[in-house]
Amino acid sequence: MSKGAIRVQREKFGSRLGFILISAGCAIGLGNVWRFPYVVGQYGGAAFVLIYLFFLVTFGLPIMVMEYAVGRASQASIAMSFDKLEPKGTKWHLHKYTGMAGNYLLMIVLAVFVQGYAAIFA
């Protein structure tokens, strides 16, 4: 750390339950908890829910565990975590651009869907 730099303390969760609830709320979202089961039940798509849950656990769980592991090990943002954790001589730092692009694309797509949903159902 350079001379005169200010060290910022990171916020920490008060309890493990709080962390789990916040993580579940961010990952699942209110739409999945409220609207999705209602629509599926209304139109008789229980088989789809089983397939949905299977793929959610199969693909979502390993990605979530990897994301938590990288975040915990680096204590940095996606932009800096791969720079901090990569072994010397490898090119893992290039994956930070994929992570940042994915975040921006996700926000763009979500903004379009939310605006479209609000325009249709408002």
Image (cartoon, rainbow, N blue to C red):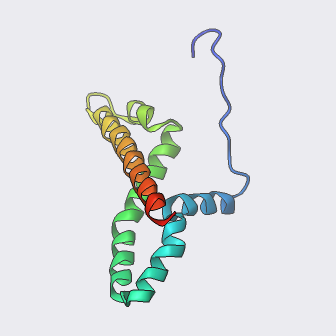
Residue 18: name its quadrant: bottom right
Task: Name which residue lies at 57% across and 12% down.
Answer: 2
Image quadrant holding the N terminus, namely top right
Q: Position of residue 100 (x, y in %)?
A: 37, 38
Up-down: is 21 above or below 91? below
Residue 47: name its quadrant: bottom left
Q: Position of residue 53 (x, y in %)?
A: 39, 76
Of residues 78 and 25, which is closer to you in this image? 25
Q: Residue furthest right?
A: 14
Residue 87 visible, this orientation: yes
Residue 117: name its quadrant: bottom left
Up-down: is 83 above or below 13? above
Q: Position of residue 84 (x, y in %)?
A: 43, 31
Up-down: is 47 above or below 55? below
Of residues 85 and 14, which is closer to you in this image? 14
Q: Residue furthest top?
A: 3
